Image: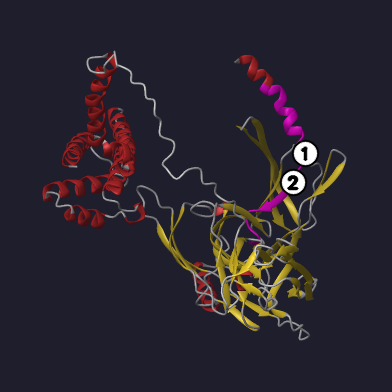
């Protein structure tokens, strides 16, 4: 084991050195007063030296303060290592105004790397002579602020569009997100949000791979944010001119934990105005409203030469990136002497953040009724290409299908109905009498009868064993098939662990941790037992759910008392004897619930 560890530590530095070098910079805020400071951080995945760092618009008050962190994972036989080296500076502005922290240049392996420029708005210091003047200034300032101001640079919502000036019918991506500054981060729980219905658009939702979009991180003007994505959708404008996408509202709980119900906050996003451009007026006659890019037209005939009454498969497919669900495939004028069966449409469409892509196909079954040459006319498909900004026509040249005479074709009746009769061989008549009856039969005596043999008793013995197995499975069917019961058994094990942790804390004289663990155990048990979401878990909801289950009123009162004691324990110290009584009551109640099912 030690030898393996030495090998791992030997190769780890080599792997780290082989990583691509990355460097970035960010700040904790981009709006300060002249007498305030801004925290400036330079982060890289390799160690670099920052010597004689000077900034034109800021003074370095403190720093650099350096820190290092690393993380190594072993996934699917591969070692992945991530390192971070941070240098933190405290900066003071030299003057008010819109100032820039210029990009920082470093040299690594004889290559130069630069960070991005960060803009900082520096306001003049507030003039405060006394507390009265301060209150008056603050009062006057509040009057100048807009009444409906919902933007907060530390926590805000945003709608973003991949394009603000799309063409009519062009695909664009709309994203609905919530941003929270990493420097002012707190526990956030999104309880409700109302996303508006977007009119004048063809809309296709993008489903995340899991139940929800993963949490990400973005940097805006030097500030890093935690990003929570609510929704992504592909939309196609159905009219030209100005189209507005209304704002959406979010309700969230901040700093919610076991002993704190949190602070409810409403957030309103921005709204977006799109300027939808009309398409050029020189559209060909074959254009049917499709807008996109990278389209292909494919036409396929199963045969170029066949017999009369023989089936011919005809397929036409259009591939591309655009609103394929609205795509109209080109029509084909088949010869009148070709019998055409109803068409079959097949779609293979994929909706991602890159738009709607895939193919739309049409399958025809054709049967020529007379011999000769059949000409399938030229096929054209026209679309407007958003990258080339012009109409493009895809063409498939005319195709000649040769149909030969069918020697097996016979006229079935006077209406010239065509029937194909396959070649048949004459059946030879061997004899007029019944054949293949064996005239010589040999009979054998069974000298080893089944009754009383080992095989007989083995078959007889398997019958009761099989019945016992079936009886056991039927009696324990719920244990094998009821997934909900299996999941609740895991919950009960976790609840028991919480109760044991609470008892351990009580033995150590720590009543705060005791009530905390006990509260976790009860809320986990009640939430799963009564099927109530934790966000909706209140005393009122618990009592109502217990009453619906016809639980004894005395037991309901005891549960209510226990939960109230756990919540009050965070504000005032509790006596150990009271905690012991609470634990005994909890264990007694839990056993009653389990006995009553």
Q: Between residues 317 and 121, which one lies in front from this camera angle? A: 317
Relative to 577, say whether 273 is above or below.
below
Quarter in which the C terminus is drawn: top left
Q: Between residues 153 and 242, which one lies in front from this camera angle? A: 242
Q: Is residue 328 left or right of residue 294?
A: left
In the picture of the structure, the residue carrying the numbered disc 1 is 48
Q: Which residues are magenta?
A: 8-33
Q: Between residues 410 and 433, which one lies in front from this camera angle? A: 433
In the picture of the structure, the residue carrying the numbered disc 2 is 23
- Residue 364 visible in this rendered orientation of the protein: no
In the orientation shown, which residue stands out farthest toward the bottom? 281
Crowding around mark 1 (Cα neighbors within 10 Å: few <14, some 14 to 19, many 20+) is some
Question: Which labelled disc corresponds to residue 443?
Answer: none
Relative to 174, say whether 51 is above or below.
above
* Residue 536 quadrant: bottom left
Tell me the residue at 53%/52% (across/down): 185
Residue 324 on image: x %, y %: 63, 69
Residue 552 on image: x %, y %: 12, 49
Whether tag 1 and tag 2 are in contact, CB under 8 A, the answer is yes
Q: Nearer the viewer, mark 1 or mark 2?
A: 2
Residue 196 on image: x %, y %: 50, 73
Tell me the SS state at disc 2: strand
Decide whether residue 27 is among the magenta residues: yes
Tell me the residue at 16%/49% (across/down): 556
* Residue 297 quadrant: bottom right
Residue 144 on image: x %, y %: 55, 78
Tell me the residue at 20%/49% (across/down): 560
Decide whether residue 501 is among the magenta residues: no
Q: Between residues 206 and 219, which one lies in front from this camera angle? A: 206
Q: CA distance from mark 1 to mark 2?
A: 10 Å
């Amino acid at each position: 084991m030690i030898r393996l560890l030495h090998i791992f530590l030997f190769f780890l530095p080599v792997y780290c050195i082989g990583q691509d070098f990355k460097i970035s910079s960010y700040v904790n805020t981009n709006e300060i007063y002249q007498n305030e400071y801004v925290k400036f951080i330079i982060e890289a995945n390799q160690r670099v030296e920052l010597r004689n760092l000077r900034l034109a618009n800021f003074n370095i008050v403190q720093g650099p303060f350096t820190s290092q962190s690393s993380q190594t994972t072993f996934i699917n036989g591969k070692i992945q290592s991530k390192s971070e080296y941070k240098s933190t500076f405290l900066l003071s502005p030299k003057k008010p105004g819109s100032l820039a922290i210029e990009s920082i240049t470093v040299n690594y392996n004889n290559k130069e790397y630069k960070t991005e420029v960060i803009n900082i708005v520096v306001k003049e210091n507030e003039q405060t002579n006394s507390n009265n003047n301060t209150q008056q200034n603050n009062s006057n300032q509040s009057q100048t602020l807009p009444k409906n101001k919902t933007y907060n640079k530390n926590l805000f919502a945003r709608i973003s569009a991949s394009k603000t000036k799309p063409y009519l019918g062009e695909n664009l991506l709309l994203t609905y997100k919530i941003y929270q500054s990493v420097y002012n981060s707190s526990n956030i729980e999104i309880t409700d949000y109302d996303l508006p219905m977007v009119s004048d658009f063809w809309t296709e939702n993008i489903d995340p791979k899991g139940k929800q979009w993963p949490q990400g991180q973005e940097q805006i003007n030097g500030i890093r944010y935690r990003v929570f994505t609510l929704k992504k959708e592909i939309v196609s404008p159905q009219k030209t001119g100005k189209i507005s996408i209304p704002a959406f509202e979010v309700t969230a709980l901040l700093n919610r934990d076991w002993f704190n119900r949190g602070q409810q906050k409403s957030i309103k996003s921005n709204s977006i105005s799109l300027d939808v451009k009309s398409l050029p007026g020189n559209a060909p006659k074959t254009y049917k409203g499709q807008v996109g890019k990278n389209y292909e037209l494919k036409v396929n005939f199963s045969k170029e030469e066949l017999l009369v009454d023989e089936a011919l498969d005809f397929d036409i497919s259009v591939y591309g990136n655009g609103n394929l669900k609205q795509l109209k495939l080109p029509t084909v004028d088949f010869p009148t002497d070709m019998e055409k069966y109803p068409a079959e449409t097949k779609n293979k469409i994929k909706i991602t953040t890159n738009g709607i892509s895939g193919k739309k196909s049409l399958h025809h079954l054709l049967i020529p009724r007379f011999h000769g040459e059949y000409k399938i006319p030229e096929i054209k498909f026209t679309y407007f290409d958003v990258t080339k900004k012009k109409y493009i026509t895809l063409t498939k040249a005319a195709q000649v299908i040769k149909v030969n005479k069918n020697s097996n074709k016979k006229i079935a009746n006077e209406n010239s109905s065509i029937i194909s009769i396959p070649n048949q061989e004459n059946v030879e008549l061997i004899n007029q009498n019944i054949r293949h009856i064996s005239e010589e039969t040999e009979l054998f005596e069974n000298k080893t009868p089944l009754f009383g043999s080992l095989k007989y008793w083995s078959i007889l013995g398997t019958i009761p064993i099989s019945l016992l197995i079936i009886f056991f499975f039927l009696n324990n069917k719920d244990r094998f098939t009821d997934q909900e019961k299996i999941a609740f058994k895991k919950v009960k094990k976790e609840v028991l662990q919480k109760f044991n942790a609470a008892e351990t804390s009580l033995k150590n004289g720590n009543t705060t941790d005791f009530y905390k663990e006990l509260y976790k155990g009860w809320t986990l048990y009640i939430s799963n037992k009564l099927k109530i979401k934790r966000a909706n878990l209140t005393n009122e909801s618990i009592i109502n759910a217990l009453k619906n289950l016809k639980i004894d009123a005395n037991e309901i009162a005891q549960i209510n008392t226990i939960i109230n004691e756990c919540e009050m324990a965070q504000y005032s110290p509790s006596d150990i004897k009271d905690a012991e009584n609470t634990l005994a009551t909890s264990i007694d109640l839990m056993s009653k619930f389990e006995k009553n099912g």
